[in-house]
Image (spheres, helix red, strand yellow):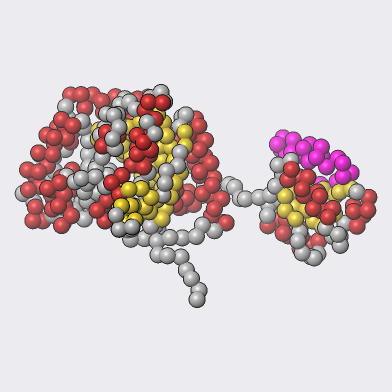
Amino acid sequence: MAYQTVKGTYDVLPEDFWKRERVKTLFSHFLDLYAYKQLETPVFEYTGVFKKENDTSDMVTKEMYTFSMNGKDSLTLRPEGTAGVIRSFVEHKLYGTNELPVKLAYIEEMFRHERPQKGRQRQFTQLGVENIGDKNPLIDAETIALGYFFIKALGLNDIRVLINTLGDSASRLEYRKALELHFAKYQDTLCPDCQNRLLKNPLRILDCKVDHESEAVLSAPKMKDYLTQDAASYFAKVLAYLDAMEIPYEIDDKLVRGLDYYTDTVFEVVSTRKESGSQSTVFGGGRYDELVKEMGGPQISGIGFAIGLERLVILGEAEGIFEDYQPSVDCYVIDMTEASDYALIIASMLRANSYSTELNYYKRSMKAQFKSADRKNARFTIIIGEDELNNKTLTIKNTRSKEQTSIKYEDLMNYVESLDDLMEEE
């Protein structure tokens, strides 16, 4: 029987793997720039880590892979990164052993049972950060800046920042009352999910994919009209810091994000390319005031964001950011002799000095081996024939300049290093 991947999963083939690694490497570089430390959490947790009382998000109500262990404990495959990071933060009491804020990051696999489509699979990878410990508009702006400048450094230019505030607890209480009164008039016209949200969290109706263009949503009250003075001042400072860093943004009154634990600042960075369609979100996140306490920790606020790696690669391919680089090796050893030990010794010496090296493993013509070296984008080739084998010499060809030189075996590393210097000058 010939097996195929399970629906909603995919193989990362070599021609795509390096693109993902390039994104991860740059992200890790930005984590270092902003002094974040990476961690890993288990791929499955107790369901209660992700599912909270009265949570109305689609992720929790429809998309989680949940199963039981021995018919007792309910476990869930990790659908998002924040909850697991906060559980770890609380369990290991990182708030007591580290200076606040604690800045954590992850690159991990996630699982959601949703309809597979381009850029959205049931198994996917998220890059994310969580800044935990202090509620400060400067931290909000810096968190957005990390993601924004990472995306720009990657080479994505067709993007824009959307931002909103959900206000503090007092603001949301008044806003919720206003939304309940407003949507009650349209209750019969709302989709079944939104009718349920009206009872549990009417704010989530603003994010509904079914009703987002309905009269009920378009005419809904705006959060900005119900902000307390403190909440309005806080949001104004976030925007001022973004202005100071020259990060362009648009205020989106209907932006609430997809999870119910967000408070105050919420944001998304979206692609403006027409072909992005419904998959235009590059990354998104926001602040959360109660999540740490709900996990059993102290009253500590946090803020974070998550980026979908698969969608980022797709957008990067569309904008051509991978075209300036192709995977390559430093050296390809062309062996025209009957004995392969000399070629193996040369390759081992180069690898021991951190030069990636490929060997010819088959009896092929020199022309065929040169073609193989070209396909692997080798920076230089080493040619070993009978004369080189007998005299313990090597013929080296610079694939850029096409210059070819014969050297002694013992001079190999000095010559290769000088070749490196020459290529850098070019």
Q: Looking at the magenta stretch, what is its main secondary structure? A: helix
Does the magenta run of residues contain 414? Answer: yes
- The reply, left or right, for residue 151 in relation to residue 216 is right
Residue 175 x, y percent position in the rendering: 13, 36
Residue at left 26%, top 37%?
A: 294
Residue 304 can be seen in this image: no
Residue at left 68%, top 57%?
A: 375
Q: Report the number of numbered marks.
A: 0
Residue at left 43%, top 60%?
A: 9
- Depicted 250 relative to depicted 108: above or below: above
| Residues drawn in magenta | 401-426
Q: Could you say which quadrant of the image residue 231 lies in? A: top left
Residue at left 16%, top 56%?
A: 191
- The reply, left or right, for residue 211 in relation to residue 273 is left
| Frontmost residue, 281 versus 215 | 281
| Frontmost residue, 421 versus 93 | 93
| Frontmost residue, 143 versus 63 | 63
Does the magenta run of residues contain 142? Answer: no
Q: Could you say which quadrant of the image residue 223 lies in? A: top left
- Depicted 363 relative to depicted 225: above or below: below
- Depicted 220 relative to depicted 296: above or below: below
Residue 251 x, y percent position in the rendering: 27, 36
| Frontmost residue, 204 versus 402 | 204
Residue 225 x, y percent position in the rendering: 15, 32
